[in-house]
Image (tube, rainbow, N blue to C red):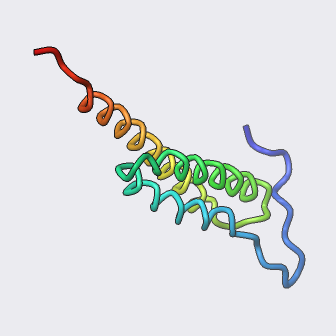
Amino acid sequence: MTAPYPPPIPAAGAQPNNTFGLVALIVGIVSIPLGCCFFLGIPVGIVAGVFGYLGKQKAEQGLATNRGQAVAGLICGGVGVVIGVLAVIATTLLNMNLPG
């Protein structure tokens, strides 16, 4: 569904606020290798997801110009969470005492 009106144009000389999208991308990329390091990928990936969502919302409101970075951060954060969950499952299964 498209908006009936285009997003507002920032005032002359005003810079778009691209901080959320940039932070989401950086933290999302960092969450992927941290998924294997003592379960750090899960909380870092969640943080990337939150910042990615907020950055995407700002871009849709016309307050930011980096929607792609926000979406990439959201995706990388999700991948980091999945890797972290898989690492937790693998660690649990490998540390089980099997009979015999």
Which residue is nearer to you in this view: 7 or 71? 71
Percent coordinates x, y for residue 62 in the rendering: 78, 61
Which residue is nearer to you in this view: 7 or 26? 26
Note whether 37 is above or below 23 in the view shown. Answer: above
Q: Residue at x 46, y 50 (%)?
A: 41
Q: Residue furthest right?
A: 11
Q: Residue furthest top?
A: 99
Percent coordinates x, y for residue 50 in the rendering: 65, 49
Percent coordinates x, y for residue 24 in the rendering: 59, 59
Q: Residue at x 31, y 36 (%)?
A: 91
Percent coordinates x, y for residue 97 in the rendering: 22, 23
Screen quadrant of the C terminus? top left
Which residue is nearer to you in this view: 33 or 52? 33
Residue 96 figure quarter: top left
Residue 2 figure quarter: top right
* Left or right of 53 on screen, residue 2: right
Q: Residue at x 47, y 51 (%)?
A: 40
Screen quadrant of the N terminus? top right
